[in-house]
Image (spheres, helix red, strand yellow):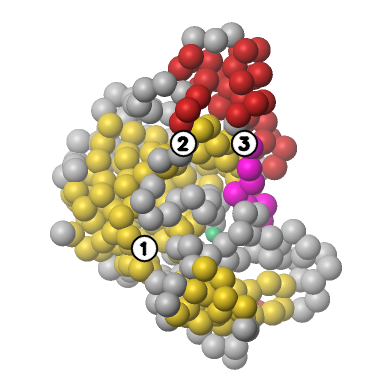
Amino acid sequence: MKRLQSNNSIYAFAPSMELALTVSAPSTVIFETIDAFGGQIRTLEDKLENLDFSRVNPATGPVFVDGAQPGDTLAIHIEKIELPKQGAIVTGEGMGVLGDEVEGHATKILPIRDGYVYFDHLKLPAFPMIGVIGVATEDQVFPTGSAHRHGGNMDTKEIAEGTTLYLPIFQPGGLLAMGDVHAVMGDGEVCVSGCEVSSRITVAIDVIKGHQMGWPVVEREDGLYIVVSLPTIEAALHEATREAVIFLQDRRGMTFAQAAMLASLAVDIRISQLVDPYKTVKAFIPREIFEGELF
Ligand code: CA
């Protein structure tokens, strides 16, 4: 099994990136990742205002997948996300949904034990997820803190163990990178961060030739999430809804209006995160209402 260490890190998803590893498809790969703070917050003495922001949001990679070409899809099955013994969360003035009401900065170290994240005496069940995961972009450069069609900082909690993420491939080899694991996070990520942890992620990578969705898609047993990230939450809500309706229209041979009605009855439009430069919305399509396989 191939393993990629966290010193192979990128800070932007671009059309061209210097590759760290080449694999064939299918392959299982381990990505060792550093937390979104670049490992700079380990104790309460490590202050947010002293962070070296050039080290924030590292993603381990990129991995060149032999045979992956523009127009194909990269299928990333997430087998395992390992957690360390603690994570960290921060907030502060100007950060998150309520940044205009928060005074100063606050940091908290969150112990992780036996499948729980401890917030003082509260025990929250750990639910490890990947915040940043993406491929080389079509033409723009997106810092790893942002997200768009290539993936990136989607902060979508369904990108978790046992699920498969599909990313559209724009450049030869795909160039996959990931990082920013959270031990737990609520939809919205309202204070600006989750339980930020370093991790070791095991994924099975494969290529689906000749098929592509417009946006990242997460597949679970119960259905699909189409994950849309755009500069405003309104734009992301509109596009995610539209993508779900067009998907149903194509799959079921319906008119647009019929598909919109079906979506209104059975599709859930949910928020992934409200705090990154591009906001992320997910449209959940339950498996019962589409027919056949995704690809
Ligand atoms: Ca994030």
Residue 82 image offset from top left, x and y in percent: 35, 68
Look at mark 1 in the image and give the residue it sits on. Answer: 81
Seen in the image, is 86 located left or right of residue 94? left
Q: Quadrant of the N terminus?
A: bottom left
Is residue 255 on the magenta stretch? no
Is 184 drawn above or below residue 211 in the view shown? below
Region rendered in magenta? 268-275
Look at mark 3 in the image and give the residue it sits on. Answer: 268
What's under tag 3, amino acid-wise?
Asp
**Residue shown at the point (62%, 36%) measured from the top left:** 268
Residue 102 image offset from top left, x and y in percent: 79, 71
Which structural element holds mark 1?
Answer: strand
Q: Label 3 near label 2: C-beta < 8 Å?
A: no
**Residue shown at the point (43%, 54%) measured from the top left:** 160
Look at mark 2 in the image and give the residue it sits on. Answer: 223
**Residue shown at the point (76%, 71%) measured from the top left:** 93
What's under tag 1, amino acid-wise?
Ile
